Amino acid sequence: MKKRRISPEEFISKVNAELPRMPGYVHGMCVFLYPDGVDAAYASGYDVHPKSALTRGVVGYAASQVLFYFDVNPQISRVP
């Protein structure tokens, strides 16, 4: 099955929409393009808020769910 390509902005939107359905989700968790405030042309990746191991785990799970169905073009990854 060929995956539909989505932009980094669409990826961020889909991950944020998926977050409330994830185990361990806490109100206020979100993902955003990094550095904060840039568009996809200047983004070097994405980051999470709040910065915690729990948030990284929940976002990682949500991101994997989105990436199962979509390819992100250009590809971005979570900043360390």
Image (tube, rainbow, N blue to C red):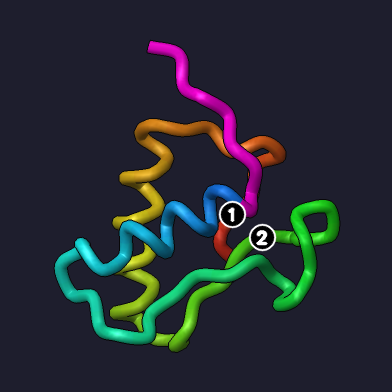
Compared to residue 78, the image places residue 64 above or below, namely: above
Left or right: where 50 falls relative to 27: right
Where is mark 1, residue-wise?
Answer: 77
Report which quarter residue 65 is drawn in: top left
Q: Foreground: 79 or 46?
A: 46
Residue 63: percent from left, percent from top: 40, 53
Compared to residue 2, the image places residue 8 above or below, namely: below
Q: What is the span of residues highlighted in magenta in the rendered image?
A: 1-9
Left or right: where 42 falls relative to 44: right
Q: Residues within 10 Å of mark 2 (few under 14, many from 20)?
A: some
Whole-number angstrom distance, CA of label 1 to CA of label 2: 5 Å
Task: Name the residue at 18% across, 75% down.
Answer: 24
Left or right: where 44 falls relative to 50: right
Where, quadrant-wise, is the N terminus in this rendering? Answer: top left
The tag on residue 45 is: 2
Who comes first in sequence, dot 1 or dot 2? 2
Asked if labels 2 and 1 touch by Cβ distance under 8 angstroms, the answer is yes
Residue 47: percent from left, percent from top: 57, 72
Residue 8: percent from left, percent from top: 64, 49
Three-letter code for the amino acid on which mark 1 is drawn: Ser
Task: Name the residue at 69% across, 70% down.
Answer: 34
Where, quadrant-wise, is the C terminus in this rendering? Answer: bottom right
Three-letter code for the amino acid on which mark 2 is drawn: Gly
